[in-house]
Image (cartoon, rainbow, N blue to C red):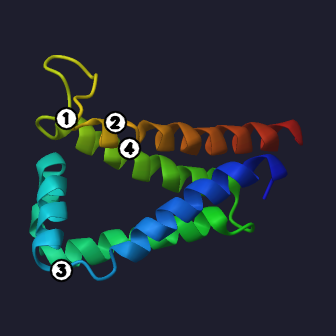
Amino acid sequence: MKLAHLPLRVSIGAYVLNSGLSKRTLEGEAAQGLHGMAVGAIPQLGQLEPARFAKLLSYSEIALGAALLAPFVPAPLAGLGLTAFGAGLVQLYLKTPGMREGGSVRPTQQGSGLAKDVWLVGAGLTLVLEGLSHGRRHH
């Protein structure tokens, strides 16, 4: 792991890992609420039972957080995972009613929590692009 990536990878990795660990035991109404919001943005997720969706999301976040924290995972690979995860959250923000001001991408007060997840996309793309451009300089 490149020293310059350390603050980014550790801070985001620890946050995402903790988020995944906290979802391991989601059931009932909590799992249904999480699932319902996700289905609103990505209807295909409706094929999953809410508790199963919560488990899969938990495992995905744990894996992504661990990949970001693991020094042997290449920056472009960790960045691709982070970009995909962040893009899913941005999609949730864009497609969930009440998150944005009418006809705008500006968040409502309720949408601010999801709108801020755009930083995950930026951080992921930074890892990908820096990793790819660094690799080119050696050839």
CA gap between label 4 and label 1 equals 16 Å
- Look at discs 2 and 4 and give the one toward the viewer: 2
Find disc 3 in the rendering and name its residue.
27
| Identity of the residue drawn at 56% across and 45% down | 124
Find disc 1 in the rendering and name its residue.
99
CA gap between label 3 and label 1 equals 25 Å
**Tag 4: residue type?**
Ala
Q: Is residue 113 left or right of residue 75?
A: left
- The answer to whether residue 48 is seen in the rendering is no
Find disc 4 in the rendering and name its residue.
87
Residue sitting at the far front: 109
Vertical comparison of 93 with 44: above or below: above
How many neighbours does mark 3 have within 10 angstroms: few (below 14), some (14-19), or many (20 or more)? some
| Identity of the residue drawn at 54% across and 51% down | 80
Marks 3/2 in contact by CB < 8 Å: the verdict is no
| Numbered badge on residue 115 | 2
- Determine the secondary structure under disc 2: helix
CA gap between label 3 and label 2 equals 26 Å
- Determine the secondary structure under disc 4: helix
Q: Position of residue 10 (x, y in %)?
A: 66, 59
**Tag 1: residue type?**
Met
